[in-house]
Image (cartoon, helix red, strand yellow):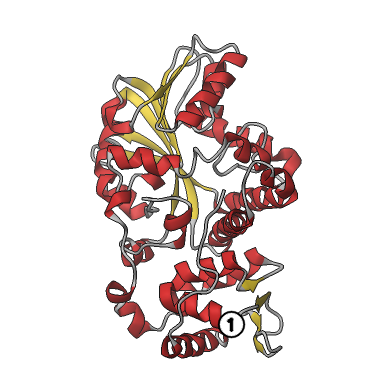
Amino acid sequence: MTHAIALTPPRSPLRVRAVRQLFRNAVTRLPLRVRMPDGEMLGDPSGPLMRVVRAEDFFSRVGADGLIGFGEAYMAGDWEADDLAGVLTVMATQLASLVPAPLQRLRGVWARRHPRSEEGTVENARRNVQRHYDLSNDLFAEFLDPSMTYSSALFHGEATWENLEEAQRAKIDRLLDETRVGPGSTVMEIGTGWGALAIRAAMRGATVRTITVSAEQRAFALERVAAAGLSDRVAVELCDYREAAGSYDAVVSVEMIEAVGERYWPVFFATLDRLLAPGGRVGLQAITMPHDRMVASRHTYTWIQKYIFPGGLLPSVTAIEQNLGPLRIAGRHEMGGDYAETLRLWRERYCSRRAEISRLGFDEFFHRMWIFYLAYSEAGFRSGYLNVRQFVLERGRS
């Protein structure tokens, strides 16, 4: 599988000089070391080391496409770092100050905007999902734990690969406990993943309907449900959340709201409310970002949207509160540090299984893209720029 970018980007000498100076100025304010190709060292000697390999290409990409170009420069090998997550954590911590204030005020002029083809309509949502979740079930099996759970775990001790599956089960159990799922409960899950939560809920005696727009995930989940002997309790359907019907004691959704898009947040929460039976509870696990940063960047096209999650936008807690409709937050639990550890384990596992993943047809550009994605995400949580929360929602309570 090839994710081609230009090996030699178009160059503008004036832009390269401007970006080079902006970069040097930014590094002086960061706890970061940068080694240039000629051996010159910039920045803080105690910080993690970033090595610029091809300076002209690096500055050309950043000058042409900002933070998208920064990620593409890593994919192309224009810069390296032994501690990639450490370098990106420094940058995430100082993200608001990396670009000078006058340029930030002109973001609407220089920043790329979301393509309309990736907005979260019913048709686009299916295509967006196919670009990520339908890559290959075998790919995800190489770096996820045996439960195939692709969201933040909840650790109660040291985070290790050996207890990742247990920590994923703890995350699921907490959400099911909070939504009171037990014998006789009816459950709607929006976003099946590979079936772990639906199976866990059915093992408690619940009847589950779980929906997804990923054909690959549905096929995998159906096999797992059948293997667990739970086909009479779990229905796995290809269905957009807007088309879901019925009334359920619990409605659960784990890290799916991030793919909805700001325009459709009111529709998403109206759907949760419509599906919830009287006295029922919603369990929502959501990645969040600070509200001011969300407002500043919500129209900006990012590297993660271009290469990993097309059409996505992380909400803030304020944005969630503003879109709840008749629902109210009855409980919340923060677990950002747990996500940083989850991502670290996934990244380390991916790197250790690189040869096996190559045999699935994924090339060097893909490896560098995926490792950058996992480290980039880990850095967001380690820096506190991102968080993840489990929300319990009820109707008509404050």
Callout 1: 10 Å neighbours few (<14), some, many (20+)? some
Q: In the visual, does 38 lie left or right of 271?
A: right
Residue 143 appears in which quarter of the rendering?
top right
Residue 18: x, y in percent? 44, 89
Kindly identify the residue that appears in the image at 63 percent across and 63 percent down. 85
Q: Amino acid at mark 1?
A: Ala
Q: Quadrant of the C terminus?
A: top left
* SS category of the residue bearing label 1: helix
> Which residue does the numbered mark 1 point to in the structure image?
55
* Residue with the most extreme top position: 232
x%, y% of residue 84? 65, 66
Q: Is residue 214 left or right of residue 112?
A: right
Tell me if 126 is positioned left or right of 35 in this view.
left
Residue 256 shows up from this direction: no
Percent across and percent down for residue 83 are 69, 67
| Above or below 230: residue 300 | below
At x 45%, y 44%, the residue is: 131
Total marks shown come to: 1
Q: Is residue 280 visible?
A: yes
Towards the viewer: 78 or 221: 78
Residue lying at 46% horizontally and 24% vertically, measured from the top left? 180
Q: Quadrant of residue 210?
A: top left
Location of residue 81 by image quarter: bottom right
Nearer the observer, 334 or 358: 358
Image-based side of 205 in relation to 114, left or right: right
